[in-house]
């Protein structure tokens, strides 16, 4: 049971990491990103920054979801 649960967390987390750009585009998460130095960037640079920042957030969340799976696998196969 522990192995199945750990694999679930791993697949879910790493799936989020690999599909981060698609998730950002589908749900338009770059629109919610705020930039404190927006006046220093051109419109194109600002858009790139917002997309990159949103992708990074999704990847960090995916990693945080997969981390318990890694720990459970290490515990299960010890």
Image: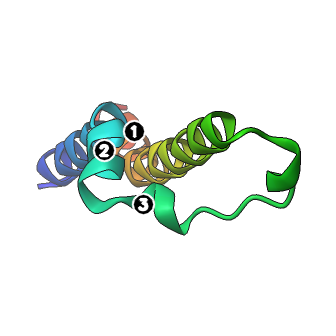
Per the image, the residue denoted by label 2 is: 16
Position in image of residue 6 (x %, y %): 25, 47
Nearer to us in this view, 39 or 19: 39
Per the image, the residue denoted by label 3 is: 29
Q: Please name which of the two marks, 2 or 3, marks the residue nearer to the observer.
A: 3
Q: Residue, x 88% and y 44% (percent of image)?
A: 40
Q: Please name which of the two marks, 1 or 3, marks the residue nearer to the observer.
A: 3
Position in image of residue 61 (x %, y %): 47, 54
Q: Earlier in the sequence, mark 2 or mark 3?
A: 2
Per the image, the residue denoted by label 1 is: 70
Q: Residue, x 35% and y 59% (percent of image)?
A: 28
The CA distance from mark 1 to mark 3 is 28 Å
Which image quarter: residue 44? top right
Position in image of residue 10 (x %, y %): 28, 41
Which image quarter: residue 43? top right
The CA distance from mark 2 to mark 3 is 14 Å
Scheme of image coloration: rainbow
- Quadrant of the rendering where the C terminus is positioned: top left
Q: Residue, x 67% and y 34% (percent of image)?
A: 45
């Amino acid at each position: 049971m522990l192995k199945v649960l750990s694999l679930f967390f791993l697949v879910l987390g790493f799936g989020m990491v690999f599909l981060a750009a698609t998730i950002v585009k589908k749900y338009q998460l770059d629109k919610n990103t705020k930039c404190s130095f927006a006046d220093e960037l051109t419109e194109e640079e600002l858009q790139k920054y917002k997309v990159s920042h949103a992708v990074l957030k999704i990847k960090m969340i995916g990693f945080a979801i997969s981390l318990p799976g890694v720990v459970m696998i290490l515990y299960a196969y010890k």
